[in-house]
Amino acid sequence: MNNINKNLMKLSVFSLMLLVGTASAAGPVWTANPGWDTPSIGGNELVSPTLADLDNDGDLDLLMSDPYSSVCLGYENTGNAASPTWNRKSEWDVVTGLSYSPTPTLGDLDGDGDYDLMLSYWNLYKIIAYENTGNAASPTWTRNTAWDTPDLGSMESNPALADLDDDGDLDLLIGLDGWGDPLSGFSYAYENTGSTSSPTWTRKSEWDVPDVGEYATPTFADLDGDGDYDLLIGESSGICYAYENTGSASSPTWTANPSWDVPDVGQYVDPVLADLDNDGDYDLLIGEQGTGVSLGYKNTAPTGAKPDLIPTAITPPSSIIANIPSTIGAAINNSGTGDAAAFDVTLSANGTVVDTQTVSGITSGSSAAVSFSWTPAAAGDYSLTVTADSGDAIIESDETNNELSQVVTVVSTGYMGGTLTSYAHDVVRGDLLYSTGNSIYRSSLPSGETYTVEFNITDIPAGAAVKTARLYSYWCYSSEEPGASMDVTFDSTLQTTDASYTDRKGYGSYDKPYGTYAYNVDLAGNGEYTATITNTGNTFSIYAMGLLVVYEDGGNEVEYWIDEGADLIYSKDGITPAQATTDAPFDGTVTLGDVGSARLITVVPSGDKGNNTLLFNTYTESGIWNTPNIAVEERDVSSDIISTGNLAQLRDDNADYMMPSGAFLVMQRFYVPPPVSSGVSLGATILPAISIDVTPGTVDFGTLAPGQASSEQTLSISNTGGCNVSVTADATDTAGDLYARGLMLDSGIWSSYSAAVEKSAAVDAGAVLDVPDDYAGVGPKEGTLVFWAQKS
Amino acid sequence: MLKKILLCIIFYLILLQTVSAIGVGVSPGNLNFSAQVGSSDSKSLFVINTGTEDSTYKVYVDKEYADWFDIAPDNFTLSANEHKEVILELKPPLSAKGEFDFKAYAVSSSSSSDFSVGSGIKIPVHASVSNSGIMAGTLLVLIAGAGGVYYIRKNKKRETIG
């Protein structure tokens, strides 16, 4: 026996997926199935297989060691999940250049959804790691030393991966061997004390397996369907010994169970467990010494009756509205022969689970209805998927038919409230007026027909100036997209649309454009004015027209806000009253002590149902708008004004839709207008009687030596007073007599300086510091020159 | 490029000159006081900072008349264009009588470690001081004293006859 003989234990992620209860409770029965045998690689040394889906096609592929080299050979399963056929796939080969007799095992060590590799070699004394830096469909093996095990103290080893403490990451059991090695035959355990994305191997002797003889090659699977890992360990005699986990999923206890042992297949065997025929239990490939082949063994134990959970229908509501909870129904049918205990069902939207429901159980041949709640964040098409038994709690006869998908369309709704647009916020000494004239609702205005409103304006004081005159047309149910087409005249003058606001339900029936158009019109003062709408497009309806006037008459000081728009709101189809609320913010800071009075005017087309509420800061009034066709309500909110964040909210409480279109806050400040008189305001700026400015305020004569004169510095003296002045100079210093003796103005000593400066005129004086020859001081020297002015 | 740098330097120098103007203005342009010895007369003098930066101002009168006046405030700081009313209260000494001409001064200065330039205004002051009140008071006291002596003597004579 040479030391190339290898044992290999493996645990693929695929087998982990099938872990929970896919086997017979009575345990496996092993029957040779030569149809699954791998091709021979020749020679008479042990080959070590491991299985995993390396190309993400739903069946198990193969890596198998070449005992005569350092290479692990790739084989693609070109058969299917129920009947494997092994074909060489050299692109998957693991070429390391190390010694020989590699023993691979596969598992996702970094939680990125593809298979990574752990590999041992003869005489290496540890397991080394390769990260799959390709992807789930195309592996690329890249060495990652950070995942290597510590020194094992044994010449050869055979790794197997499984989550032995049920903490979500893969732990490691290493069968030890080696010619003459006293540890050979033992299996040592290592707990992953790192994480699902970065393993750290820490010795865990409690999980060790006793000596099985020689050349231990473990592999894991739940052989009795009790939810924990059981164990097969190959050995040099050619037998794979079975150990039932009589502990738990989080704390294994290995108890020999000879009834599960695999018959002697020769000598030096290396088993790997996997479901090779997709029947829900674990089969075997056993690497063997002598033929260069891994032998197939089918688990022929009866599996009994199994349920089969199939989502058969997804039932969305007639409309799914963005940001509104929707109930999505689903039906789950158990078409298998066995009953299903409790299991979870998930609803996913575009691949993200949005709700999970638990079904208490379904008997064979029955079905269950499931209701999910889903609140899509935005409009658009979504792929909804219902997954039965999302947690794989149920052993099914077919695990591949648990999903059903359906594309649904999510719409946005115009019935949710928005925010009116702030058109103006200003202060005038005057007031704000609003009227809908003699407007009446017109249910249909066909193309070419006209609609006329008379406004009789009488409340503008004589002499007042109109600051703003704004005409509104409130229309609805337009047959034309994106909104009604109309010509609007005011006082016979065709107007240009200054602002247009539209809204719509957004789904189902009555999904037509509604809106408000605004026009700035000329209005001189009181009088009768005519506004006319002419339909220039398709038919629409008209609620009314409105005329807003802001005038200035020099009277009360008024701060006003004009919010306008068109916001369809309706508390229905899952929209709460809070959502069916139109906001009208009045930004800015208010000095509460200045507030004399305040009134709030609201304009609500279709506000005639009465089941609605106005909120203004702390003010609340229900049933406020109940005037047919268009409701205009004015309320005194003097005591409800707050300093910042004044906000009106117009809310529908589930009556019928309404379209808040205007909110005007008019706040009169405490202000006593000046008495009307013919007086003339007087004002004057008086110059000081005598005043001069001197520039600059400081002079630096530089660095000078005794006997040296500075350059001339120009000082400007400006007469900024109301009379002519005579100017003299006075020098003082704290530097001995430096400035007293050395300061020269206009070439003469400062004391003789005199200048006459006329009103508004200026003169320059040239200042020179002529340091006396006998001056004894050194260093910086301060002094002051004052120009004195006196009336001349 | 050099041209631009020179222009920047010139502009900077101009800016410096503008910023450092020191100015003072006063109203009225002269002060006339009239007071009797023992009483006082007050006048307001408005001082304005006509310069472009904060300045400290002092208001005082010629040294020989300094004891005659209470000046409030006599030392203060004004921001540019700020003004302050200064009250000059004349309290002539008992020895004073006659017409006096002297000067009051309002002067600004900026603190600097260099050679500083200030501006000041000399305000002509005329004080007319009389002591007529003192004389009248003295005469009144003398008359009252003489009357008192006469009354005491007369009462003593009546007590002796009786």
Image (tube, rainbow, N blue to C red):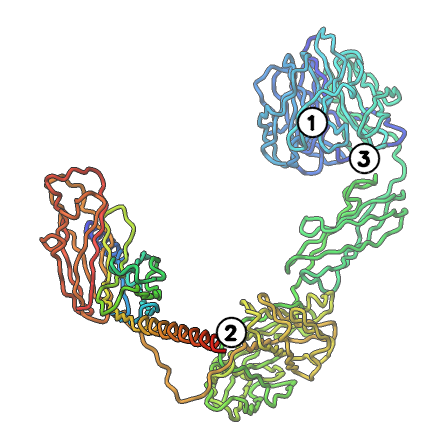
Q: Would you call the spot at circle 3 few (<14 residues within 10 Å), some (14-19), or many (20 or more)?
A: many
The residue depicted at 19 percent of the width and 61 percent of the height is A717
Q: Amino acid at mark 3?
A: Val
Q: What separation in Å lies between label 2 and label 3 (alpha carbons)?
A: 68 Å
Q: Chain of mark 2?
A: A
- First reached walking from the N terminus: tag 2 or tag 3: 3
Question: Are labels 2 and 1 on one chain?
Answer: yes
Assess whether mark 3 and mark 1 are in contact (beta carbons under 8 angstroms). no
Q: Is residue A524 above or below residue A428?
A: below
The quarter holding residue A620 reads bottom right
Residue tagged by mark 1? Answer: A193
Q: Secondary structure at mark 1?
A: loop
Of A537 and A515, nearer the camera is: A515
Nearer the camera: disc 2 or disc 3: 2
Residue tagged by mark 3? Answer: A20
Q: Secondary structure at mark 2?
A: strand
The quarter holding residue A2 reads top right
Assess whether mark 3 and mark 2 are in contact (beta carbons under 8 angstroms). no
Q: Quadrant of the C terminus of chain A?
A: bottom left
Q: In the visual, does A583 lie left or right of A465?
A: right
Q: In the rendering, which numbered label is found on residue A424?
A: 2
